[in-house]
Amino acid sequence: MTPTDANRPLQLNDHDQLRHFLSLDGLPRELLTEILDTADSFLEVGARAVKKVPLLRGKTVCNVFFENSTRTRTTFELAAKRLSADVITLNVSTSSTSKGETLTDTLRNLEAMAADMFVVRHAASGAAHFIAEHVCPDVAVINGGDGRHAHPTQGMLDMLTIRRHKGDFEKLSVAIVGDILHSRVARSNMLALKTLGCPDIRVIGPKTLLPIGLEQYGVRVFNDMNEGLRDVDVVIMLRLQRERMQGGLLPSEGEFYRLYGLTTARMALAKPDAIVMHPGPINRGVEIESAVADGTQSVILNQVTYGIAIRMAVLSMTMSGQTAQRQRDNEQAAEELN
């Protein structure tokens, strides 16, 4: 779980522009801020009568989702279409992968269709990195979530939500609550908050759902929900990921809610103007009380809206970085021939 900058050379071109977007590990604060600023500029596109800009006109974005998704897949589709790209969504359950075709063969077939970018979601940690390492040089890869490892666009949309509602990260206390062990969202959020200068990052959960090595993220760990929530500015609740759990980690969902569910009473321990977030889907009465999820402090639906803008920013910036690198490579090759 130790965050490193090992991903940096793979993700960035010679001028430190994005060419893939796989993880927030090793990405500099300036680049994360640029993503947030670019997303801010795209928010007004959603308010237009014609919700289109021509930045990816003539490009083909292929959504390759090996894992079920609603919000991530849909917002990536909307983001690509608002950038005027052509979009293909691969239904893996009916594709050749269900007949035994390897991941590499699937990618080669997609490359043969002249796709310019793959958005990949996979249950295996490291799948997006594997694809980025083996894809042809002209194709950009965006990680839409891989196993327990990373969900970088969710991390960035959460950062945009926090910045728009709470302002400067350097003055905030943020609590991340629940199933930290299995959550790729928690990992991406911890990395982003640390990089953006948040001085007080707290993780709250039972010992069985807290991974080893959290101190590498500069966080404070709490097993007591009431203590951990005291005077925070932001509460990020996480989904209990039972599909990734093996037996014995939780006594029951009812017991989890009693100890770690976000109720109106517990929310009162945070600052009066604190906001509540959740990556979805929400398990009401397990992770969060409906009165809190639907209350005035909830910005959960805002997260979905901001997710489109963040994904527009990442798609456009990655394609731009990929194109710039290709141009420089071509110029260098021409110089060597001369």
Image (cartoon, grey):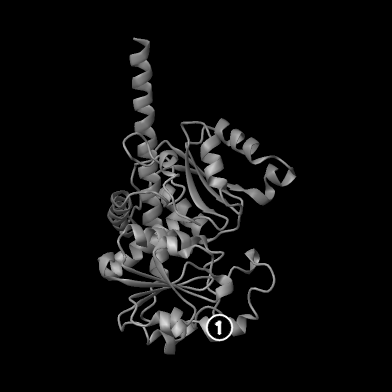
Q: Residues within 10 Å of mark 1 (few under 14, many from 20)?
A: some
**Residue lying at 32% horizontally and 56% vertically, measured from the top left:** 49
Q: Quadrant of residue 202?
A: bottom left
Q: Position of residue 10 (x, y in %)?
A: 44, 39
Query: Is 89 left or right of 84, judged from the image as shown?
Result: right
**Residue lying at 56% horizontally and 80% vertically, measured from the top left:** 286
Quadrant containing the C terminus in the rendered view: top left
Q: Residue furthest bottom?
A: 265
Q: Which residue is mark 1?
A: 257
Q: How many marks?
A: 1
**Vertical position of residue 208 compared to residue 306: above or below:** below
Query: Is 178 left or right of 244, judged from the image as shown?
Result: left
In front: 175, or 291?
Answer: 175
Is residue 112 at all visible to an observer of this figure?
Answer: yes
**Vertical position of residue 124 compared to residue 217: above or below:** above
Q: Residue furthest right?
A: 99
**Residue lying at 39% horizontally and 64% vertically, measured from the top left:** 218
Say which amino acid is labelled 1: Tyr
Q: SS for tag 1? A: helix
Query: Is 80 left or right of 285, judged from the image as shown?
Result: left
Is residue 294 at all visible to an observer of this figure?
Answer: no
Q: Position of residue 139 (x, y in %)?
A: 48, 35
In front: 207, or 163?
Answer: 207
Q: Position of residue 165 (x, y in %)?
A: 29, 70
**Vertical position of residue 24 compared to residue 260: above or below:** above
Q: Position of residue 171 (x, y in %)?
A: 26, 70
In front: 300, or 94?
Answer: 300
Q: Residue furthest top?
A: 338
